[in-house]
Image (tube, helix red, strand yellow):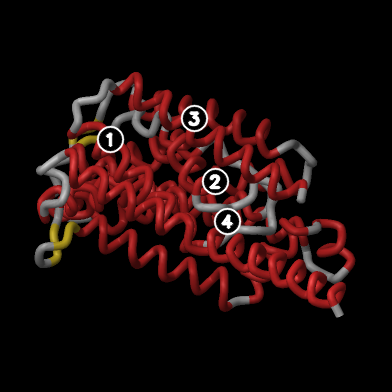
């Protein structure tokens, strides 16, 4: 009887620990975000104001859209280092079109997104069909894309005067910045794709076990290529938004944006080994980075230290991911 009681207590302890760990994995990011908000609202009176909150949401909208596309990539155990260059290509193409005709804002946006989607498709094809490692394929595309943007503009920015195109990055719908509306719309649409379609299930299957996915009849190469195309389209949208926000298509724009996008996805709990992660986690990761960046700016922390802090956060998230994978 005593042994049964002891065994029961041990099992209960294990179950309790497992439940606590599960709850922490599920809600830990939200708790971290809330703690960061509380801490920054205490140390800075300017943080928890409507104006600043809207500013934070506007700032994270571009990185949020990039991170959503990166989530698809990392779920398949891939990576994309070229999103900054694809942003630049989209920005200069869109800017050149509205520079000729300010009324062609929608055409300019679609053209920029299409160009980036094509570049993403090339990266995906190199990875899926030619067995080039995603890191190498997208590193090559990062250089190629940047070169295309520089050649297209001869290294000079293209000024944007189109009011309709500027609305993309500077407009408001009521009190809400239009980029935030776009971010929410993209998050909802991509969540539906990920959770409610066969394609979304295929993404998890490919990332979880590529060989098993292939044996089960999934066309792995097609899934990978489309994932990179989607990522390219979203990078193109983000690039056009950035160009609209700064009122010019800059061939050097988008540099370093891949760092924040990858950081948001990893912090959000998506495994670099593929097959595990969620869109909600990515969105919370985006908000955590945005809140930290904004708070550090309000506290007048040097941008150099901000880079170090981001790097430490990324390293910590990857270490935790590897430990979880090992278990």
Residue drawn at x 79%, y 41% is 131
Give 273 or 181, whichever is nearer the viewer: 273
Looking at the image, the residue that sits furthest to the front is 2
User: Given contact means CB atoms under 8 Å apart, are the residues at marks 4 and 1 in contact?
Assistant: no
Mark 1 burial class by Cα count in 10 Å: few <14, some 14-19, many 20+: many
Q: Earlier in the sequence, mark 1 or mark 2?
A: 1
Q: What residue is disc 4 on?
A: 72
What's the CA distance linking mark 4 and mark 3? 24 Å
User: Given contact means CB atoms under 8 Å apart, are the residues at marks 1 and 3 in contact?
Assistant: no
Mark 4 burial class by Cα count in 10 Å: few <14, some 14-19, many 20+: many
Residue drawn at x 27%, y 50% is 37
Mark 2 burial class by Cα count in 10 Å: few <14, some 14-19, many 20+: many
Q: What residue is disc 1 on?
A: 249
What's the CA distance linking mark 1 and mark 3? 32 Å
Q: Where the N terminus falls, by quadrant? A: bottom right
Q: What residue is disc 3 on?
A: 312
Q: Secondary structure at mark 4?
A: helix
User: Given contact means CB atoms under 8 Å apart, are the residues at marks 2 and 3 in contact?
Assistant: no
- Residue 235 in picture, x, y percent from top left: 44, 47
249 w.r.t. 280: above or below: above
Q: What residue is disc 2 on?
A: 266
- In the picture provided, is 180 more to the left or to the right than 52? right
Q: Earlier in the sequence, mark 4 or mark 1?
A: 4
Q: Secondary structure at mark 2?
A: helix
Residue drawn at x 23%, y 48% is 56
User: Given contact means CB atoms under 8 Å apart, are the residues at marks 1 and 2 in contact?
Assistant: no
Mark 4 against mark 3, which lies toward the viewer?
A: 3
- In the picture provided, is 145 more to the left or to the right than 172? right
């Amino acid at each position: 009887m005593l042994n049964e009681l002891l065994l029961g207590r041990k099992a209960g302890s294990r179950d309790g620990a497992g439940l606590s760990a599960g709850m922490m994995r599920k809600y830990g990011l939200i708790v971290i975000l809330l703690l960061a908000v509380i801490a920054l609202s205490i140390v800075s009176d300017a943080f928890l104001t409507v104006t600043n909150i809207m500013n934070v949401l506007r700032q994270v909208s571009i990185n949020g859209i990039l991170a959503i596309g990166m989530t698809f990539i990392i779920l398949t155990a891939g990576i994309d280092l070229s999103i900054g260059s694809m942003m630049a290509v989209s920005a200069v193409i869109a800017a050149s079109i509205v520079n000729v005709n300010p009324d062609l804002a929608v055409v300019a946006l679609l053209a920029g997104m299409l160009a980036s989607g094509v570049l993403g498709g090339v990266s995906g094809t190199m990875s899926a069909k030619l067995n080039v490692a995603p890191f190498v394929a997208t590193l090559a595309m990062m250089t190629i894309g940047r070169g295309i943007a520089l050649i297209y503009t001869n290294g000079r920015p293209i000024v944007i005067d189109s009011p309709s195109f500027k609305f993309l990055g500077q407009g408001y719908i009521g009190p809400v910045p239009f980029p935030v509306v776009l971010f929410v719309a993209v998050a909802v649409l991509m969540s539906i794709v990920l959770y409610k379609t066969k394609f979304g299930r295929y993404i998890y299957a490919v990332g979880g076990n590529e060989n098993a996915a292939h044996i089960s009849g999934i066309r792995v190469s097609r899934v990978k290529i489309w994932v990179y195309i989607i990522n390219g389209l979203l990078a193109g949208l983000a690039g056009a938004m950035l160009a609209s926000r700064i009122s010019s298509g800059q061939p050097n724009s988008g540099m370093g944006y891949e760092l924040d996008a990858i950081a948001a996805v990893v912090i959000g709990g998506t495994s670099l080994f593929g097959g595990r992660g969620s869109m909600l986690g990515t969105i919370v990761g985006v908000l955590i980075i945005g809140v930290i960046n904004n708070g550090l700016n309000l506290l007048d922390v040097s941008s150099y230290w901000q880079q170090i802090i981001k790097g430490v956060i990324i390293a910590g998230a990857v270490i935790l991911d590897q430990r979880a994978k090992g278990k």
